[in-house]
Image (cartoon, coloured by chain):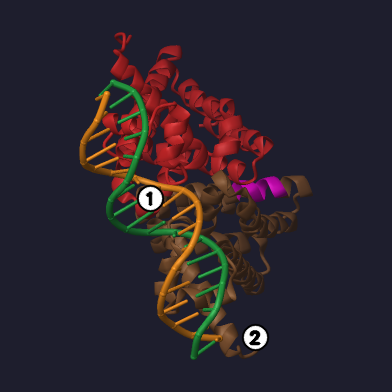
Chain colours: A red, B brown, C green, D orange
Amino acid sequence: MSAALSKGERTRADIVECARRLFYEHGYDGTSFSAIVEASGLVRGNIYHYFKSKDDILKAVVAQHLDEFSALLARWERESTDPKQRLLAFIDMVTGRRNDLVKYGCPIGTLNSELAKDRRDLQQGARALFDLFRTWLAARFTEMGQPPAAADALALHLLGRAQGIALIAHVYRDAKLLQQETAVLQDWVKQL
Amino acid sequence: MSAALSKGERTRADIVECARRLFYEHGYDGTSFSAIVEASGLVRGNIYHYFKSKDDILKAVVAQHLDEFSALLARWERESTDPKQRLLAFIDMVTGRRNDLVKYGCPIGTLNSELAKDRRDLQQGARALFDLFRTWLAARFTEMGQPPAAADALALHLLGRAQGIALIAHVYRDAKLLQQETAVLQDWVKQL
DNA sequence: GTCTATAAGAAGATAGAC
DNA sequence: GTCTATCTTCTTATAGAC
């Protein structure tokens, strides 16, 4: 439950939301500052009033992602107490977002992949999004009786499988491939 | 066995090799034309004598990749007639290249991932690199008695697993994670 | 908090001399 | 085939009026 936003806070949130969508659809480097200007309906100077640089906007976008995914993970924990069901909720997210995944790839994976090559400073922040899922998934495997090291390995395994599926589906722009592979991943979870 | 190259052909090949390395290490968009100029030791105008645009250089880089990977696949076919051993050769490539994979990601995966967002024209050419492996891997599953549709699905599954491993290892810059996950993938192949 | 104007540099690409 | 010089456009960022 968040408090009502002041005008300034609303403007700031609007900028972050526009940037989040543009960064996802076109990549960080592929999104010019002017594109954010146009999408937000504001003017250049105004945006610089809220953020001192484009890098700064990305940091806010990553923070927003962290908030939203944290809320999602909390919801999955509320919706079921069975660790397997919780893991399946993770896979359901992948199938549920298949249209965007096919068009733009995984928002976390493509962002980290882009930043990892030449913007390691920014990637370090974006990697927190991986850590969020990695930790949460590992906790589910711990619930299933796995010791810590094995739980972390299984979490990374699942995360990697999901990333591979998203990448292949993105490269081939094919939702059927995504469905086909998530089914295999579901079977893997069920037989654990 | 290739014929000796003329001076012009050598210069052209040098440009492609410099660009290939830069595109891999810094991404396509992250590599400026000036960077290719400096790395090749030539001057701007000279490079434009061989390629009419930066996009054109990328197409030549993709073509070179296709040549090299085709040669690699042919070698794996010579080195063993057992389909499982051939699949394991594919995984051995991943572990063998772990240092570069950790630092720069998969040359095929990161290139396609970058281009798929906003340069679909170029990505279409780069996707041929995925098709090369997809077709070759599917042929191995066919050798193992799988019908065509299943062989293709298994090929994409293996390709996706390898991509996921490369991405995770790249994001965390961790060769141990790569080793850990390739071991799991080897086990999967062996139990087929 | 909003806006205009502009700085300062880097990008890809071209023309034309040698 | 090699080179210098330049064009145009786009980039992020800033200064300062209102």
Residue B153 lies within the magenta run: yes
- Secondary structure of the residue carrying tag 2 is loop
Q: Which mark is residue B2?
A: 2
Quadrant of the rendered image containing residue A32 = top left
The answer to whether one can see residue A147 in this image is: no
Q: Nearer the viewer, residue B142 or A46?
A: A46
Tell me where residue A177 appears, x and y as whole percent.
Answer: 66, 39
**Chain at tag 1:** A
Q: Which mark is residue A116?
A: 1
Range shown magenta: B152-158
- Secondary structure of the residue carrying tag 1 is helix
- Determine whether B45 is above or below A67 in the image: below
Amino acid at circle 1: Ala
Amino acid at circle 2: Ser
- Determine whether A187 is above or below A123 in the image: above
Give me the residue at 53% from left, 53% from top: B109
Q: How far apart are marks 2 and 1 (CA)?
A: 37 Å
Tell me where residue A31 appears, x and y as whole percent.
Answer: 45, 41
Q: Which of A160 and B66 is in front in this view?
A: B66
